Amino acid sequence: SVLEWRRSMEKEIEFAGPYEILQISYEEMKRDSVGVTKSVLTHLEVPTPDDVVEDMVHRSSFKFVTGRKAGQENKDGFYRKGVTGDWVNHFSDEDKRRFSELAGDLLVELGYEEAADWRLWRR
């Protein structure tokens, strides 16, 4: 539920600093897979040459794993579509309103949205 998601995210934010939790998002991974992978390995104190990181990213890419380009959907598969922002195709206006009401401010705080009000969401 929305409230369960909100509570888990609030706990993650609360404990991230004291427990050195590295916070990353799917959107960050899509935007900069190599950079984020390097930051994860650095956080774990695992020195890794750049060519190995690039190979890791390549071998875990949507295309490599599924044989499909990002955006080519398989509704029944675990790796469904491989794109960010696809929620807009699955949320009704009521879903958006409810999420906005219960967690819109948190979506803004986390950088997922620019406004807490679902009517202003870019999508």
Image (cartoon, helix red, strand yellow):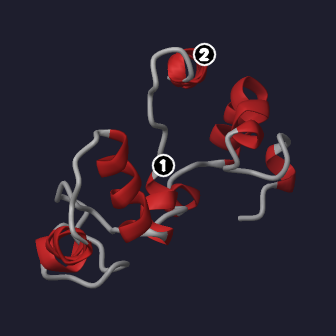
Q: In the image, residue 113 lies at what x, y percent?
A: 74, 51
Q: Which residue is at 78% across, 28% downward?
A: 101
Answer with left or right where residue 66 lies relative to residue 54.
Answer: left
Residue at 50%, 70% (x, y): give it. Answer: 31
In the picture, which quadrant includes the C terminus? bottom right
Amino acid on which the number 2 mark rests in the picture: Glu
Q: Nearer the viewer, residue 113 or 95?
A: 113
- Where residue 74 appears, x then y in whole percent? 22, 68
Query: In the picture shown, does residue 123 fall above or below 92?
Result: below
* C-alpha gap between disc 2 and disc 1: 17 Å
**Residue located beneath label 1 in the image:** 25
| Image quadrant in which you'd find residue 96 | top right
What amino acid is found at the position of numbered circle 1 in the picture?
A: Ser
SS class, disc 2? helix
The residue closer to the viewer here, 67 or 24, is 24
The image shows a total of numbered marks equal to: 2
Q: Earlier in the sequence, mark 2 or mark 1?
A: 2
Viewer-proximal residue, 64 or 70? 64
Residue marked by disc 2: 14
Label 1 sits on a secondary structure element that is loop
